[in-house]
Image (cartoon, rainbow, N blue to C red):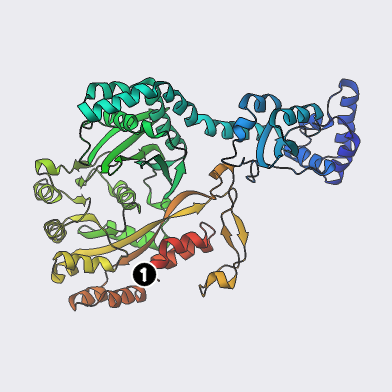
Amino acid sequence: MPKEKYLKLGDMLLKEGVITPQQLKKALDIQAKEGGRLGEILIKMGAAKEEEVVSILGKQLGIPYFSLGTGMLKPAADQGLEELIPRDFAIKNLVLPLSRVLKSLTCAMYDPLDLVLIDNLRKLTGCEINPVIATRADIIKAIEEFYGKQTFLKQAVEATYEVAPAIEEAIELAEGQLSLDALIARAEEAPVVKLTDLIIRQAINERASDIHIEPFKDRISLRYRIDGKLYEIPPPAKHLHLPIISRIKILAKLDIAEKRLPQDGAFFVKLEDRVIDIRVSTIPTIYGEKVVLRLLDKSSVVLDLNQLGFETHQLEQIRKCINMPYGLILLTGPTGSGKTTTLYSILNEIKDPTKNIITIEDPVEYRLEGINQVQVKPEIGLTFATALRSFLRQDPDVMLVGEIRDMETAEICIRSALTGHLVFSTLHTNDAPSAINRLIDIGVHSYLITPSLLMVVAQRLLRKLCPDCKEAYEPDPEQLGGIKLNAELIYRPKGCSKCSQVGYKGRLCVAEVMVVTDKIREAITKHATYQEIKELCISEGMQTLYRSALRKVESGITSLEEALNVTMEIGG
């Protein structure tokens, strides 16, 4: 904190209504007796918050005030700032480099009038220093976040260079002589183990759902999927590709020698009190094996229909159908649209000691208490169809089939629904009405669909705006392009430290719920077209995916751009 003009700072705090004259007098008395800085005394007294004092101090000095909450304490990427000012120096002096333009370096400082520190920074960096002011707490947090992320993987990658010659030798042996013992030994070298562990740990910390490790001609690509979007992460060196893939294969109990065929496996990791289920998939590419790790954090999944994002009237329709004694209920949407989570939430809601619930899945993603779950194993003949035939001898009340892929599975599901069972399954279609056409394309007769099908739910996942930094604005008519919104102000992403400057945090589903009414059954019997069925569904009260997404925009939950990116092509 600067050491002069205390009275002026006090006057400004009084003028802004931050403190009272009595508080200022008391602080000045303490300062006269014990010394110290007026701002710090007021903060210790509880008369003012640190951010209030620092903000007004910035006005007094004519120096910009930066805060963590606004995202302004975000150092520029790819400028080598972490090397320009080392971490230890930053922590010791409470200074954070933010950006560099030619020979001018902008730094956040707790005490921007510390001329000795500014002179030391000038000598250390070779740049002229442009100071901005920030609170001690914000600078400490920003330093931890910036230097932590910059060095997290970097240290592990650098450590692997110590064993690089040995690793490359092992690769040559493995490729030339298939000396797998040597390759396994190198894959379990401490630096490679540490790097692989850190890649997984960082993905978990960043709330990633998938890790993509892809080989190219001269480099490796490392990407995390966060809230449905892929983000590039600084990758390891090219020569580390084979050891990392081998390490992952060892963990997932895959064949380390097989590089020509796709493989699937799984393993668990424990991080503090969380158990993460990791599914591994490898495919051979022209430059080597690509691996994708899917992270299933069971502690972060809320299996509650009320929390998924359905509208109130949609929940009423869903609850009415899932409590029927028999019939077929379908969920549709592309891979990664949240169908499995919705199905598990439904089972979690309707499970009861009086009901026998059996599932057949590929794979079983979450284990549910009180429900019999079966994993598909095609290699031994355990398919959806064969399992379903056995299920009917198990006296079930409710059956869940992971996916309807062929005529045989579809027919057994429908016949089960017609013989007193409640059946849930999924289809890959763009919207709810097209599920009927899909069943007919598979080979199911319309006279079987009409008495069995209760409801079709189509859904997508939308990114939610970060509640800490989203900003309201009045949309331009050109931006709307004829879209009618029942809100004068909507929200857009801004970016802050809490959402890693993305502007979005978390996802929720948008859906269209098609309840099969008598009119819709009549249309199916008459072989109505997709468009005719869709128009009939809308006239019967179905809210389309498009309209459902716009409702989330009007509520300030997501942005217009996100809603249009996910649902515009489906129409409305």
Q: Quadrant of the C terminus?
A: bottom left
Measured as percent of width and height from the top left, residue 360 is found at: 19, 46
Residue at 23% across, 55% down: 425
Residue 314 is situated, as x and y percent measured from the top left of the image, at 38, 62
- Of residues 312 and 429, the one nearer the viewer is 429
Query: Tag 1, which secondary structure?
Result: loop
- Residue 144 visible within the image: yes
- Measured as percent of width and height from the top left, residue 91 is found at 65, 26
Tell me which residue sits at (71%, 26%) in the image: 93
Please tell me whether residue 187 is drawn above or below residue 245 in the rendered image: above
Q: Amino acid at mark 1?
A: Met
Question: From the viewer's perspective, is 545 left or right of 3?
Answer: left
Residue ID for mark 1 = 542
Question: Could you tell me which residue is drawn at 42 percent across and 33 percent down?
Answer: 237
Q: Quadrant of residue 436?
A: bottom left
Q: Is residue 537 left or right of residue 49?
A: left
Which is more toward the observer, 35 or 291? Answer: 291
Q: Position of residue 452 (x, y in %)?
A: 18, 64
Asked if residue 367 can be seen in this view, the reply is no
